[in-house]
Image: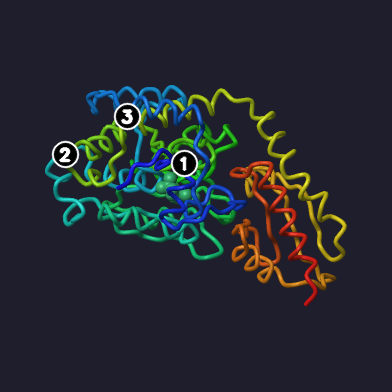
Amino acid sequence: MANTNNAWDVGSVHQRLGVTPIINAAGSITRLGGSRTRPETLQLMSQAARVMVNIDDLNRAAGKELARLTGAEAGFVCSGAAGGLVLQAAAVIAGNDPVKMRQLPNTDGLKNEIVIHTMHRFPYDQAYRAAGAHLVEFGDYLFAHPWQLEGAINERTAAVAYLVAPFSSNKVLPLERVCEIAHARDVPVIVDAASMLPPRANLYRYLRDGADMVVYSGGKGIRGPQGSGILVGRADLIEAAAAQANPAQFLGRGMKVAKEEVIGLVASLAAFVEEDEAAEMEAYRAMVQPVVDALVELPGLRVTLEHDRVNYLLPQAAIYVTDDWRGPSRDAVLAALEQGNPQIHLQTLAGPQELAVDPLNLTEAEVETVIRRLREELTRQG
Ligand SMILES: *Cc1c(COP(=O)(O)O)cnc(C)c1O
């Protein structure tokens, strides 16, 4: 390959590959790039990539740091939250018994059932099945009662899984109640809180509610390495998870985390914990307020700045189409933005009549472009 001076300039690499950068106003969506990694993290990673270390020692030391930062007994840097879910299941099914560990994902004869709210079934729960878990649902699509959870737990139960995510149902049993019921039967509770940071309070909350292991994404709101994750919790379970992860040649070996990613994740979490959340949120608010100001007077739309810390983890500009709206449909606007130049992706999680601009991955220049394109498409005459 010709090695011209600018061969590794990212713009020219994208161009050579035929990959066009997009504007991601949708938040920390993996398919749209995840999040912008902290610059100081990237600098550290480029140094750490060139220093050889014993990976077991590094993993242990990094785990201690994650534990310190989250108040957990122990921690482990996993390959994204999804990789952490596989390790959670492997840990509760096989412990650190090498005979059982080698048998995975075949779980014949092992405690292999993971109990989960029907309302918590979601595509990522395949990660539990990847370790050989059988999912046992309780409750229905609208309700769940304590007796249903009690009835689903038996001598084959390895854990109860619990999902915390924006827009997941609030009709589920509270985590504290689930932990009470599971612990009374000596069953651990494993939590997926992948996208719940910030707010920082969520770093401590689920363990305090009784969870035995919690997983967070490293590549979402904390802006660590995109391929990293945080697994924290009970020391024996974390030890069992680590025993099956890279560099050990067990089930988790296919989910390797590079040494520089381990360092990058720890540094990112430390920086995240130290940041002033009020100032951070104020900066995000200032970023999306111009979107509200630019669109608020369009008749038939309701445009507001929203910061509901359950559903919207960051302040967002939310655009609601009301009955009085006479312009193009929400989906037509979305499609036009996604197919335009540059491609712009907005957040659509909140419902069929709503759009939101999430500031996580935007620069100020990109906000200007989003405003210009939104105005163009919203005021387009059919
Ligand atoms: C994003 C997400 C994951 C996957 O996280 P990665 O770090 O990308 O592997 C898993 N569970 C939930 C609920 C998520 O939102």
Q: Please identify, in this view, whether the residue under mark 2 or under mark 1 is nearer the observer.
A: 1
Image coordinates of residue 184 in percent, x first then y, are 39, 41
C-alpha gap between disc 2 and disc 3: 32 Å
Sequence-earlier tag: 2 or 3 = 3
Name the kind of residue labelled 3 in the image.
Answer: Ala
Density class for disc 3 (Cα within 10 Å; few <14, some 14-19, many ≥20) is some
On the image, numbered disc 2 is attached to which residue?
97
Q: Residue at x 81, y 59 (%)?
A: 302
Identify the disc placed on residue 79: none
Sequence-earlier tag: 2 or 1 = 2
Do the residues under discs 2 and 1 have CB atoms within 8 angstroms? Answer: no
Is 176 placed left or right of 261 in the picture?
right
Image coordinates of residue 360 in percent, x first then y, are 60, 43
- Which quadrant of the figure has residue 365? top right
Name the quadrant of the C terminus. bottom right
Is 119 placed left or right of 331 in the picture?
left
Density class for disc 2 (Cα within 10 Å; few <14, some 14-19, many ≥20) is few
Asked whether mark 2 lies closer than 8 Å to ligand 1, one says no
Density class for disc 1 (Cα within 10 Å; few <14, some 14-19, many ≥20) is many
